């Protein structure tokens, strides 16, 4: 029925519900990037000398680098002098000690976003660090966690309280020379979360950081460092939103994870940065370097990501499997709609013996979007009996979107077993009709089928995140079947 | 309940339904038989509102409203149910999830509250009893890896749960073994009521021994060429369809 088709095409997508702007006074540095700006950021934060030195080295190195061109994404050149590298809500004193001291306007912002910072958080059993533009504005449960020796705090606080840990681990997984955006981040990073789980401790609750970009023309450059000492376990969640603005905003984060002997880290992301409007105007450039080192024997790191937002996503959460018998996992759903572009995947670097990795990637492309999976599996010469299983499925909606798969496999050890499976399918009219015949409207039918397609990934998410992710999948694909 | 008047439908400019007339009153069971390619599935698809068919003439009145004006899901919510000849698989979506979403969609239209998890499970279990389906099927993906017979039973389970006013069963008996045929027939018979009408498409008179129809129609080349009672099916079993070609076009008894 042509009539119905038309109706679907005219369907107005629901507004990006996190797209509001918080009216709050901010202290910002003027736009532009120079050694002086780097020094100012470090000075505002009262950082020790070693950190300033490190930032400056990163900055000087960044100046020598060129923007990476290999990703399957296209955007106008970014003028790094137009961006402000620091913005913080104005505060009276040194920063909030408890929630009572947090600006109520900020608490309302997080409430609107459904992030519990107050009493309800206690019930939800999730410890939250909320990062607003460049600084952490609220951090719950710190005391309770401290009883077990767990450190969960804003990165800038950790710099003061545990400089030895920062010095030892910062840049040890992602050196500032790693890539263009990692170098930029290392020079100007403002805040983020720091987690340390002591030997033998199983973190009793999910740790969660909520990132929000608010200020206009500001980049967010957060830095997260998680260290799980021998025989420890932690599950960490990360959520992100931003207001709807016509200009593109840059988000270049670096996340480093270190797992020691038999330690396990589960890192889950639901990324819902503003994707831009249906014509590709506005939206976040999400250029992120995430990497984990399985340093200890039998350690394990699991990345789970649901990526629905951002105008451009460039992101490859990776695992370096150094310890013998270590395990790396990557579960990913990447949804692109309208004019969004995603180039995402993982790198599994097998160095230790009997290391194994699993990669499950589900790409969904709708509208006129471009969705690429890029994955590297490398097996080093000493990695006897390395195992990798990769499954890479793409689902296309409509006929103007595209899916691409770029698998790279480098094996230098003859005992390795590397398996790669890939499929591309279209959401089928038969499935849609079947669901509609049972009374479901088009949006519910699409959401159900897509969630089914992503089930292997969704089920890896902690419960409260899984529900949010399922809703997001439905929302971000609204109006996309035609 | 349902009145189909001079219904013409085509696909890609090729006319497949060529003037169907059929009246189904509440409480009646009609069987539609006819050779392969006659247009039986096309008729059920058009009634259910599938995309890709052009209605060139005629109308369909269902409960006093013009059925063809509605989207497929609106028809379903108003009580039109199609048991598919080839039920589709939906990987990753559990059967129970679909059943619940479907029931709640229909209840919402009826102005009823969603059932809570416990009431829903109790209800589903009682319906599974009816078609003798094991509970494990609730947690498997919709139709994925189901045998042909299991898929058909699953359709009847959905029908039993949704309690439609008009059920169209497209070859629900094909692929069923004798025991399954009995079970499915008992399920359907249990759903027969004064308020519910059933259109059964089948190739086999055998089904009609279990579900005895009030009327039997023969569909050939997009038209109903003969109608009668259950004796007509027995006659067809003996004579086959070769005689239909000898009938002048457009005849309906
Ligand atoms: N989408 C389509 N495109 C082209 N031809 C079609 C399409 N759908 C149906 N047809 C044709 O219409 C005719 C009727 O098909 P239909 O499936 O309704 O037959 P049927 O009576 O259900 O047959 P069977 O007993 O084999 O199930 C067939 O010739 C079929 O090939
Ligand atoms: Mg058929």
Image (tube, rainbow, N blue to C red):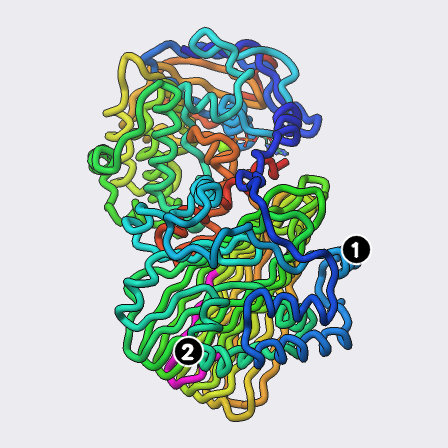
> In the picture, which quadrant includes the N terminus of chain A?
top right
Q: Secondary structure at mark 1?
A: loop
Residue A129 is situated, as x and y percent measured from the top left of the image, at: 43, 57
Which chain letter matches label 2? A
Residue A231 is situated, as x and y percent measured from the top left of the image, at: 31, 79
- Residue at image x 61%, y 44%? A397
Residue B21 is situated, as x and y percent measured from the top left of the image, at: 52, 11
Instruction: In the displayed orientation, state which residue is furthest to the top.
Output: B64
> In the picture, which quadrant includes the C terminus of chain A?
top right
Q: Residues within 10 Å of mark 2 (few under 14, many from 20)?
A: many
Mark seen at residue A338:
none
As for residue A301 lying within the magenta part, the answer is yes
Compared across the picture, whether B143 is left or right of A311 comes to: left
Q: Which residues are magenta?
A: A293-304
As for residue A3 lying within the magenta part, the answer is no
- The answer to whether any part of residue B219 appears in the image is yes
- Residue at image x 51%, y 45%? A473
| Residue B62 against residue A206 in the figure, above or below | above
- The answer to whether any part of residue B253 appears in the image is no
Compared across the picture, whether A173 is left or right of A122 comes to: right
Tell me how far mark 2 sits from mark 1, CA to CA: 38 Å
Q: Is mark 2 within 8 Å of ligand 1?
A: no
Q: Of A125 and A302, which appears nearest the observer? A: A125
| Residue B248 against residue A215 in the figure, above or below | above
- Residue at image x 61%, y 14%? B249
> Mark 2 sits on what residue?
A259
> Mark 1 sits on what residue?
A76
Q: Residues within 10 Å of mark 1 (few under 14, many from 20)?
A: few
Which chain letter matches label 1? A
Q: How many marks?
A: 2
């Amino acid at each position: 029925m042509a009539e119905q088709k038309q109706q679907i095409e005219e369907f107005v997508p629901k507004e990006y519900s996190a797209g509001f702007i918080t009216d709050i006074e901010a202290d910002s540095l003027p736009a532009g990037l120079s050694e002086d700006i780097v020094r100012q950021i470090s000075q505002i934060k009262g950082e020790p000398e070693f950190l300033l030195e490190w930032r400056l080295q990163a900055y000087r190195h960044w100046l020598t680098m060129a923007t990476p061109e290999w990703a399957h994404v296209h955007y106008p050149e970014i003028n790094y002098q137009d961006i402000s590298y620091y913005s913080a809500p104005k505060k009276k004193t040194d920063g909030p000690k408890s929630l009572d001291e947090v600006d109520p306007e900020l608490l309302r912002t997080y409430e609107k976003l459904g992030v519990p910072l107050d009493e309800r958080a206690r019930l939800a059993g999730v410890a939250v660090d909320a990062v607003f533009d460049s600084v952490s504005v609220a951090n719950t449960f710190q005391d309770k966690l401290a009883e077990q020796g767990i450190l969960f705090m804003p990165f800038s606080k950790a710099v003061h309280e545990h400089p030895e840990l920062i010095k030892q681990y910062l840049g040890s997984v992602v050196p500032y020379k790693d890539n263009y955006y990692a170098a930029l981040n290392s020079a100007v990073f403002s805040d983020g979360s720091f987690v340390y789980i002591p030997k033998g401790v199983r973190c009793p609750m999910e740790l969660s950081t909520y990132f929000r970009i608010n200020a206009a023309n500001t980049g967010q450059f957060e830095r997260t460092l998680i260290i799980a000492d021998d025989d420890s376990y932690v599950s960490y969640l990360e959520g992100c939103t931003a207001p709807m603005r016509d200009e593109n905003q840059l988000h270049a984060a670096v996340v480093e994870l270190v797992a020691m002997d038999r330690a396990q880290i589960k890192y889950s992301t639901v990324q819902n940065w503003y994707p831009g409007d249906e014509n590709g105007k506005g939206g976040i450039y999400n250029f992120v370097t995430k990497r984990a080192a399985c340093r200890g024997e039998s350690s394990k790191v699991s990345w789970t990501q649901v990526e629905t937002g951002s105008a451009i996503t460039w992101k490859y959460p990776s695992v370096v499997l150094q310890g013998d018998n270590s395990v790396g996992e990557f579960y990913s759903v990447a949804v692109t709609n309208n004019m969004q572009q995603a180039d995402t995947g993982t790198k599994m670097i097998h160095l230790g013996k009997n290391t194994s990795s699993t990669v499950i990637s589900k790409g969904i492309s709708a509208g006129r979007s471009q969705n690429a999976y890029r994955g590297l599996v490398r097996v080093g010469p000493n990695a006897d009996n390395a195992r990798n299983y990769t499954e890479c499925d793409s689902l296309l909606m409509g006929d103007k979107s595209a899916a691409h798969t770029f698998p790279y496999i480098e094996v230098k050890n003859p005992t390795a077993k590397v398996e790669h499976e890939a499929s591309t399918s279209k959401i089928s009219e038969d499935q849609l009709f079947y669901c509609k015949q049972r009374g479901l409207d088009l949006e519910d039918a699409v959401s159900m089928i897509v969630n089914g397609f992503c089930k292997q990934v969704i089920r890896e998410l902690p419960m409260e995140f899984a529900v949010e992710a399922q809703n997001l999948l439905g929302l971000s694909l609204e109006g996309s079947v035609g | 309940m349902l009145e189909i008047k001079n219904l013409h439908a085509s696909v890609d400019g090729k006319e497949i339904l060529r003037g169907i007339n059929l009246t189904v009153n509440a409480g009646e069971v009609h069987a539609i038989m006819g050779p392969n390619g006659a247009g039986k599935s096309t008729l059920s698809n058009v009634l259910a509102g599938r995309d890709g068919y052009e209605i060139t003439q005629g109308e369909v009145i269902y409960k006093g409203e013009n059925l063809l004006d509605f989207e497929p899901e609106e028809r379903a919510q108003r009580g039109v149910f199609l048991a598919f000849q080839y039920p589709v698989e939906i990987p990753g979506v559990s059967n129970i999830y679909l059943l619940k979403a479907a029931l709640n969609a229909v209840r919402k239209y009826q102005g009823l509250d969603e059932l809570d998890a416990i009431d829903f499970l109790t209800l589903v279990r009682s319906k599974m009893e009816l078609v003798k389906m094991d509970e494990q099927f609730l947690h498997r993906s919709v139709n994925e890896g189901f045998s042909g017979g299991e898929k058909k039973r699953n359709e009847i389970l959905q029908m039993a749960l949704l309690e439609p006013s008009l059920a169209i069963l497209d070859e629900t008996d094909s692929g069923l073994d004798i025991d399954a045929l009995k079970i499915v027939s008992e399920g359907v018979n249990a759903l027969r009521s004064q308020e519910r009408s059933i259109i059964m498409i089948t190739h086999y008179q055998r089904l009609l021994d279990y579900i005895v129809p009030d009327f039997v129609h023969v569909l050939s080349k997009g038209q109903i060429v003969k109608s009668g009672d259950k004796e007509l099916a027995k006659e067809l079993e003996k004579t086959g369809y070769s005689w239909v070609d000898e009938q002048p076009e457009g005849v309906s008894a």
